[in-house]
Amino acid sequence: MGRRRLILSSIVLGAIALYAVAIPALAGIDDRIIDFAQARTSPSLAHLFGTDASGRDLFVRIAKAIRTSLLIAAACAILATVLGVVVGAVSGLAGGWIDRIVMRCTDAVNALPHLLLGIGIVAMFRGSVLAIVLSIALTHWTQVARIIRSEILSLRSRPYIDAAILAGASRRHIITAHLVPATAPQALIAIVLLLPHAVWHESTLSFLGFGLPPHAPSLGTLLEEARSSLLLGGWWTLAFPAGILVVTTISVAVAGSALSRRLVPPPPKVLVR
């Protein structure tokens, strides 16, 4: 079942990625041209997803929006994972009072409302992609840090680590050759699972007007633009971007869940007699 879900979600994500990359280049439509004569045109053969309030083709704009949102989300997920791995590794390897201080700081960051903190960061640099990436990454590394710390604490008690110490391996060799590489599967899973969260947060920030500027196509800006059209009967301006957003995030989440089951083996079963 897990393999089937991984294959199906990968096919869906591959189709979405192909749509995002190929359509803007092959459609032959310049979505930057404003044509109010074609404003709020319903879906047809000429415009498969209809047009928005400015007469721009939504089929092309949604493809560009997916590309923008996924690139920003990937940068957020990678940066958040790197921060989490560094903090978790330092905490797990150091132990003692350093571990306690780092974990209390992690709890403090985790207790902050992520969306409000993100709004506060991007409000100071409105329209900046870097500010959006930092606002999401700086609020999503805490869970990764906890996972990496737990993994390192578990690895330190493994028999092969004790054998390496008895064989005369240095602390640096044990860390670089055994402990840190063993957390790579967890880091990869964290990146995949953080992607849908980053997509939703970027879309929320743009929808609220704190993210990308209106002329930059992203799933959030398209949803924000759809509010006025929806009241005038332009259901397609909301339905298609929202549908793509839901399908993309669900596919990434399913793929990440299936991948985690394949990369991280289940705990051994204990037979009780």
Image: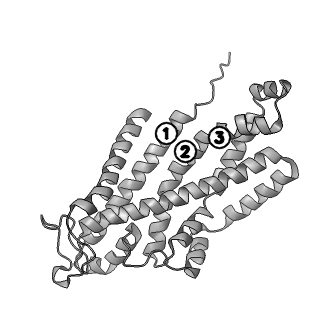
**Lateral position of residue 129 relative to residue 112, left or right:** left
| Disc ID at residue 183 | 3
Residue labelled with disc 2: 189
Expressed as whole percent of the image width and height from the top left, the position of residue 93 reads 79, 44
Instruction: Rate crowding at label 1 as few (under 14), some (14 to 19) or many (20 or more) other CA atoms within 10 Å.
Output: many
- Work out which quarter of the rendered image holds the C terminus and state it: top right
From the viewer's side, name the closer residue of 27 and 140.
27
Q: Are marks 1 and 2 in contact (CB under 8 Å)?
A: yes
Of callouts 3 and 1, the N-terminal one: 3
- Residue type at the position of mark 3: Thr
- Work out which quarter of the rendered image holds the N terminus and state it: top left
Q: How many numbered marks does the figure carry? A: 3
- The residues bearing labels 2 and 3 have C-alpha atoms spaced at a distance of 10 Å
Query: Measuring 22% from the left and 60% from the top, which residue is drawn there?
Result: 26
- The residues bearing labels 1 and 2 have C-alpha atoms spaced at a distance of 7 Å
- Residue type at the position of mark 1: Leu
- Residue type at the position of mark 2: Ile
| Disc ID at residue 259 | 1
